[in-house]
Image (cartoon, rainbow, N blue to C red):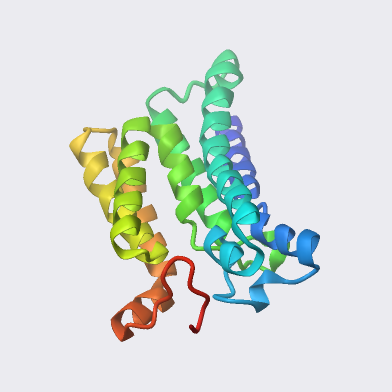
Amino acid sequence: MGLGVAYTALIAILAYLLGAIPTGYWAGKLLKGIDIREHGSKSTGATNVLRTLGKGPAIAVLLIDILKGVAAVALTRWFLTNIVTSSVVDFGAWIPWLLTLAALMAILGHSRSIWIGFTGGKSAATGLGVLLAMSWQVGLGILAVFLITLAISRIVSLGSMAAAVAAIILMWSFQQPLAYQLLAFLGGLYVIWRHQGNIQRLLAGTEPRLGQKQGE
């Protein structure tokens, strides 16, 4: 029992630390010597990087933030199937729940990074990454919803929130394990909650569109 708790804690901590890698913050420091949290929307996510640093850095930050989520789940799955199963601990039916724990911790880490005073981004990209690793069908589905919404509205935040809602529906539609459905529900609500400022600007008609700087 004690070893099982230790393994669970290790999974949670490592997944959080992976998610907490402050990609956008580092990009601002390395490329322009700025704290990106003091510019634009104050977020460290790829959208604010795009507006502040340009297209190339934004693409790099986006891909790394997605890969953080993929890595958190993939490494946890590898750990459980190759290390834990060869020990005296048998998690068995708990594996989907532990993958869900890793996913949630990675999402939390991205938005509340220990490395930058528990600040960060909106967790949409890292959320996409964990979903791609847990269920590629759902991951590709929400990516399609995001891209379609973005193409129509040219508003990144609207695409992210639409994808968060789609994740909940698609996890249920593809009959994924209950743990994964719970992840989509909690993670989706968290991503939407992180967009409170964007929602206010959307309602006021002041939310910037893609290619438009904050405040324009």
Task: Please name the residue shown 56% across and 23% down the image.
Answer: 78
x and y percentages locating residue 61 in the rendered image: 61, 52
Residue furthest out toward the left: 173
x and y percentages locating residue 2 in the rendered image: 59, 34
Task: Please name the residue shown 58% across and 62% down the image.
Answer: 50
Task: Please name the residue shown 22% across and 47% down the image.
Answer: 169
Q: Does any portion of residue 141 appear in the rendered image?
A: yes
Residue 51 as seen in the image, left or right of residue 173: right
x and y percentages locating residue 216 in the rendered image: 48, 83
Q: Does any portion of residue 8 appear in the rendered image?
A: no
Q: Is residue 10 above or below residue 201?
A: above
Q: Is residue 178 above or below residue 198?
A: above
Q: Quadrant of residue 10?
A: top right
Question: Which of the two residues, 174 or 206, is positioned nearer the viewer here?
Answer: 206
Q: Quadrant of residue 191?
A: bottom left
Residue 110 as seen in the image, left or right of residue 53: left
Residue furthest out toward the top: 86
